[in-house]
Image (cartoon, helix red, strand yellow):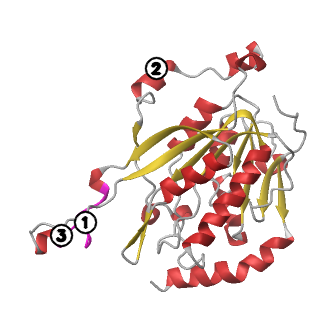
């Protein structure tokens, strides 16, 4: 096991390329979804080039190699991105970067979204206007959940009592078909969810499954791209400790609302009592580019 951690859960507004707040081998699971490369629904124009996006992932991979405990898992929810008619192989490139940093590539789970949530778009509708070969442009109903491991896991390192507390519900496992490499899960719809408006958030069911399958109670779950705080919310509810990094300070109120910071528990304690909020200096030099990206998105 890694070093015992004595700090509170953390909300860190800073660049995840330097996770100086975390000690070596202090994290037991990573669940994250990096920003889509310059996608109009996420942060258009945030990166100067695709290479800059890959540099971010590369620097993050080095930090994850340092902070992730031996044998533990990093899960990335990602998809290839189409920008200005150019398809960027994000899934393949992230896999190459992580394995290049020494991670073992374990699995690729395909997250399939309901067909009914996407009607024929302008892209796929091209064939309706031109019903001939070479006019086929399919709509995407899937994303990949890439699973990487940092070395070999020592199963004997987990005490029996911890295993018992973290036991997976076999009926839930079978009923919802977690055993398949294809997960059918409804995506978050920003129009119907004001907390997620303007944020490419994943549904709680994804971190829920990953946290149950790859971590034990009281262990630390990290999301280096915290967004609206979905991973942290689910991790805390499942009895894990959590830490998240985010460069958009304006999401602070959204995260606090999602985590129900001001709602007292049965003992009269507020969730905010169990969290530490850190705003790093490096967020300041990132704000100008991020704000410009957000303005660009709002004008579309």
Q: Is residue 136 highlighted in magenta?
A: no
x%, y% of residue 5? 87, 38
Could you tell me which residue is drawn at 70 percent across and 33 percent down?
A: 151
* Relative vertical location of residue 265 with respect to residue 225 in this rendering, above or below: above
Residue designated by label 3: 135
* Relative vertical location of residue 160 with respect to residue 298 in this rendering, above or below: above
| 161 or 131, nearer to the observer | 131
Query: How far apart, in angstroms, are the residues tagged by discs 3 and 2?
Result: 45 Å
Q: Residue furthest front?
A: 100
The C terminus lies in which quarter of the figure?
A: bottom left
Q: Residues within 10 Å of mark 2 (few under 14, many from 20)?
A: few
Task: Tell me, yes or no, whether the two marked residues, 1 and 3, touch with CB atoms within 8 Å.
Answer: yes
Q: Which mark is residue 278?
A: none
Q: Residues within 10 Å of mark 1 (few under 14, many from 20)?
A: few
Q: Which mark is residue 171?
A: 2
The N terminus lies in which quarter of the figure?
A: top right
- In front of the other: label 2 or label 1? 1
Residue range corresponding to the magenta coloring: 117-126
Which structural element holds mark 3?
loop
């Amino acid at each position: 096991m890694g070093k015992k951690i004595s700090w509170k859960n953390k909300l860190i507004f800073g660049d995840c390329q330097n996770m100086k707040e975390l000690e070596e081998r202090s994290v037991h699971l990573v669940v994250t979804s990096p920003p889509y490369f310059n996608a109009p629904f996420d942060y258009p124009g945030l990166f100067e080039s695709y290479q800059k996006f890959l540099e971010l992932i590369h620097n993050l991979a080095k930090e994850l190699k340092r902070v992730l405990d031996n044998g533990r898992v990093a899960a990335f929810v990602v998809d290839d991105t189409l920008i200005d008619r150019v398809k960027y192989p994000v899934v393949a490139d992230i896999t190459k970067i992580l394995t290049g940093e020494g991670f073992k590539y374990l699995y690729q789970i395909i997250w399939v979204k309901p067909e009914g949530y996407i009607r024929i778009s302008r892209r796929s509708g091209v064939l309706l206007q031109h019903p001939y070969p070479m006019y086929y442009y399919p709509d995407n109903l899937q994303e990949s959940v890439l699973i990487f491991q940092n070395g070999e896991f020592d199963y004997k390192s987990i005490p029996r009592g911890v295993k018992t507390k973290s036991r997976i519900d076999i009926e839930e496992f079978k009923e919802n078909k977690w055993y398949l490499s294809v997960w059918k899960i409804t995506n978050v719809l920003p129009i119907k969810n004001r907390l997620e408006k303007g944020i490419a958030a994943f549904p709680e069911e994804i971190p829920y499954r990953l946290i149950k399958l790859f971590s034990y109670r009281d262990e630390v779950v990290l999301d280096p791209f915290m967004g609206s705080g979905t991973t942290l919310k689910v991790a805390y509810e499942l009895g894990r400790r959590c830490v998240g990094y985010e460069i958009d300070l304006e999401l602070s109120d959204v995260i606090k609302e999602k985590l129900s910071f001001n709602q007292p528990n049965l003992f009269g304690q507020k969730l905010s009592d169990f969290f530490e909020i850190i705003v790093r200096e490096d967020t300041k030099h990132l704000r100008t580019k991020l704000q410009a990206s957000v303005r660009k998105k709002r004008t579309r």
